[in-house]
Image (cartoon, helix red, strand yellow):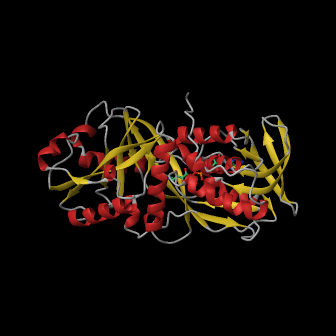
């Protein structure tokens, strides 16, 4: 709670991006407020695959810059939040009908290791055939090779909460639950109208950061005058949680239906299975897992882990759906860029900065880019703390 009404930076949205920007803004010494309508990580930031990764599959689309930056961020997060971000083994089986041949995978993994900085602990290897039987009864019919590499897992909701706590400890003001209802340009920034349970607030901010994830264009529509609003597609991704843990390691599989990558991951003693890519229309508040997505995901499990999938204890106990924000296009969602797009009202002196897309993994780098843009308007800020060196708190501690 705060009675302060004048801020340098107001951040709309308390997902990982809003939390990251609030932390970076406070670390730079700017008077900061972050406004979240439901609860921290209420949107996509609690419905991701919970991976802190470079994204091996983005190599296929030649998104080398994104992969390199993400791997650098993975290394930073493993250092500043070892209680929240930890490396794990990922196994990739290659079957006779798999999309990629073993040599292609070896090439991709070599490049991935190279972009990650060639550290010894990130080296990959081919699992000897004699060890396949230890891989949670994975189907060995037509299995040609299994590769193992390292990437990191997190708890996305806890990570977001930790970044919010860090922002607050650096001096950011938190308003939650509180909804941005409208904002009007004053020439020196924005006058914001914010609704809280039982009260209405007026705040002023010199820079407004729209970090509303899939709601980004709905928030932009509440601004006057209306800022630039790129056309976007919302693409739904569903995950299932199964009651039993398949393995302590992660599996990177191909869907037998369309060859898409699907992860099977350990998750708090259970198994997380995902994800899908389904075009979404409507209000982001209404996103929900679909029966056909559940069937698609269970088919992956039944194909590659038939013994596990048929166990009565391996039941679905939770379903969740999140929304990706992708550039508008007719192409397959899978093939579209996952790079973040920062949209401003004025590149030279922005009073409005909106975050389109991006990844959980890159939140800190994205936040630093947002603050670099905000500095063009606000000046350097009263302090110069680098978020790469700020250890994140334990949100449950
Ligand atoms: C299925 C799926 C799997 C993914 N897996 C991964 C992964 O494994 N690794 C990875 O790096 N990335 C992953 N991503 C991407 C990553 O999850 C997202 O990029 C990230 O969570 C987006 O965070 P955000 O803060 O932009 O949006 P959100 O988390 O959606 O936050 C937006 C917030 O804004 C709030 N809000 C909206 N309107 C208002 C308003 N008017 N006033 C106040 N608050 C408002 C909402 O309540 C919400 O909390 C995945 C994405 C999806 C969809």
Does residue 323 appear in the picture of this structure? yes
**Foreground of the two, 79 or 283:** 79
Is residue 375 rendered to the left or right of residue 127? right
Q: Is residue 332 depicted above or below 9 in this figure?
A: below
**Foreground of the two, 164 or 309:** 164
Image coordinates for residue 287, horizontal then vertical, percent? 56, 49
**Foreground of the two, 218 or 165:** 165
At a point 39% along the width and 62% down the height, the residue shown is 115
At a point 67% along the width and 40% down the height, the residue shown is 38
Residue 210 placement: quadrant: bottom right
Does residue 282 appear in the picture of this structure? no
Residue 232 placement: quadrant: bottom right
At a point 56% along the width and 69% down the height, the residue shown is 328
Q: For the N terminus, give its image quadrant.
A: top right
Image coordinates for residue 168, horizontal then vertical, percent? 69, 39
Is residue 96 rendered to the left or right of residue 231? left
**Foreground of the two, 389 or 153:** 389
């Amino acid at each position: 709670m705060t009675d302060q009404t004048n801020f340098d930076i107001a951040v709309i949205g308390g997902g990982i991006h809003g939390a990251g920007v609030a932390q970076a803004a406070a670390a730079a010494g700017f008077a900061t407020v972050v406004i979240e309508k439901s609860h921290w990580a209420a949107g996509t930031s609690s419905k991701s695959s919970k991976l802190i990764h470079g994204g091996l599959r983005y190599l296929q689309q030649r998104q080398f810059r994104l992969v390199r930056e993400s791997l650098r961020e993975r290394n930073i997060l493993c250092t500043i939040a070892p209680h929240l971000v930890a490396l794990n083994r990922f196994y990739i089986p290659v079957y006779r009908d798999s999309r990629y041949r073993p040599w292609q995978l070896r090439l991709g993994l070599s490049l991935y290791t190279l972009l990650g900085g060639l550290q010894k602990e990130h080296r990959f290897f081919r699992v000897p055939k004699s060890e396949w039987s230890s891989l949670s009864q994975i189907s060995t019919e037509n299995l040609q090779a299994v590769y193992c590499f390292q990437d990191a897992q997190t708890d996305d909701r806890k990570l977001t909460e930790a970044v919010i706590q860090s922002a607050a400890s650096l001096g950011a003001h938190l308003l939650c639950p509180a909804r941005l209802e409208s904002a009007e340009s004053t020439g020196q920034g924005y006058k914001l109208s914010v609704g809280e349970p039982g009260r209405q607030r007026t705040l002023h901010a010199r820079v407004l950061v729209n970090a509303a994830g899939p709601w980004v264009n709905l928030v932009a529509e509440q601004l006057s005058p209306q800022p630039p609003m790129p056309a976007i597609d919302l693409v739904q991704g569903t995950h299932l949680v199964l009651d039993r843990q398949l393995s302590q390691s992660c599996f990177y599989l191909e869907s037998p239906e369309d060859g898409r990558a699907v992860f099977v991951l350990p998750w708090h003693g259970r198994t997380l299975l995902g994800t899908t890519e389904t075009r979404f229309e409507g209000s982001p508040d209404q996103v929900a897992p679909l029966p056909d997505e559940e069937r698609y995901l269970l088919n992956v499990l039944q194909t590659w882990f038939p013994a596990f999938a048929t166990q009565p204890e391996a039941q679905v106990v939770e379903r969740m759906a999140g929304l990706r924000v992708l550039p508008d296009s007719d192409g397959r969602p899978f093939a579209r860029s996952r790079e973040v797009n920062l949209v401003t009202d004025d590149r030279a002196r922005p009073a409005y900065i909106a975050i389109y897309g991006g990844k959980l993994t890159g939140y800190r780098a994205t936040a630093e880019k947002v603050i670099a843009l905000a500095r063009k308007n606000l000046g350097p800020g009263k302090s110069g703390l680098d978020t790469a060196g700020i250890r994140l708190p334990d949100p449950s501690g």
